[in-house]
Amino acid sequence: MNVVTQSPLNAEPDWDDFRLPITPHFFNRNHYEFPLVADEIQVCGRIFTVEQMRSLPTVRQEVTLECAGNGRLFMDPLPPGTAWGWRGVSNACWTGVSLGELLKLAAPPEDTVELVFQGGDVEYARSLPIQECYAPGILVAYAMNDEPLSIKHGGPIRLVVPGLYAMASVKWLTEIRAVNQPYQGYYQVEDYQFKPVDGPVRPVSTMLPRAMIVTPKEDERLDGQVVISGWAWSGFAPVESVQVLVDGQELPVELAEARGPFAWRGFSASVRLEAGQHEACAVARDSKGHVQPMQALWNQQGYENNSVRRVRFQVS
């Protein structure tokens, strides 16, 4: 892992971790030190233990989570905040109970506007509009990659919200409470706001489309036959295509079979190249027409940098 900050721990996987569809070392994003919390959660006034949740209908699904500040290090000028490179993203298989299923057993009051998800790490909390809380895929998770959810990754219970940047997937979840007016917590209305130089401020929310080249690595030396491969994702809709260019020339691209509605999708392209330095890039497009930009819009907190990354490598 590449440790970005030691305390609290913020760390990116190594590039080799991205060769596998399930990321062996999941990225770690923390605002505070790891807390110790009980293996139970309060949902609209009702207590559920992990053991009780295991007896409820189980959902197991792959979900790609990405830090909203992924790529901040490459914005110019550099905004304040944790200096994430390009590796603040990972894919895992999560197991838990559908949030909608829990809400059947612990129904919010009729006047509920939002649900607030309280983390055990000091004051971290986020909310979702009540109508979004019944969306397919939102999990109250207690396992990751078929193992009990570790403290390092938000255990014993965390929220997993597919499609949204990872700040929405509250870790060390202790309570889900109903409110009858929009939640005004710091991490809801102050932090995680997109603040451009000109234009309105808006909340950071849905993951923008991105293609991440895994091979070759930057400055890697290769033989003449080169395979460009990696992963692509979008929070808006499934990835429909990836455009791969080497030295400006577009290559035929093969998309791997989809791994589910909430997981990244593999892509690859092959080309024979002459000796020398070369440059590759990849551009993702989702099925709703969202396309990854060559350059992202600079903003004061350095969020949503989904600009196209260029990888330079050598052929001998």
Image (cartoon, helix red, strand yellow):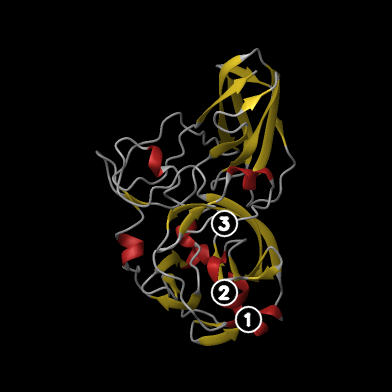
Q: Could you tell me residue 233's position as x and y percent?
A: 58, 43
Measured in 3D between alpha carbons, the distance from the residue under mark 3 to the one under mark 2, in whole angstroms, is: 16 Å
Name the N-terminal-most of marks 3 and 2: 2
In this picture, is 312 found above or below 3?
A: above
Q: Which residue lies furthest to the left in this view?
A: 198
Looking at the rendered structure, the kind of residue marked 1 is Val
Determine crowd level at label 1: few under 14, some 14-19, many 20+ residues with C-alpha closer than 10 A.
some
**Of the residues tagged 3 and 2, which is closer to the observer?**
2
Residue located beneath label 1 in the image:
50
Looking at the rendered structure, the kind of residue marked 2 is Ile
In the rendered structure, find residue 34 and report the number of the disc placed on it.
Answer: none
Determine crowd level at label 2: few under 14, some 14-19, many 20+ residues with C-alpha closer than 10 A.
many
Residue located beneath label 3 in the image:
162
Q: Could you tell me residue 176's position as x and y percent?
A: 48, 76
Residue 111 seen in this snapshot: no
Q: Which is more toward the observer, 269 or 205?
A: 269
Looking at the rendered structure, the kind of residue marked 3 is Pro
Measured in 3D between alpha carbons, the distance from the residue under mark 1 to the one under mark 2, in whole angstroms, is: 8 Å
Residue 303 seen in this snapshot: yes
Quadrant housing residue 287: top right
Name the N-terminal-most of marks 1 and 2: 1
In this picture, is 244 found above or below 171?
A: above
Q: Is mark 1 in CB contact (under 8 Å) with mark 2?
A: yes
**Secondary-structure class at tag 2:** loop
Residue located beneath label 2 in the image:
157
Q: Residue furthest right?
A: 257
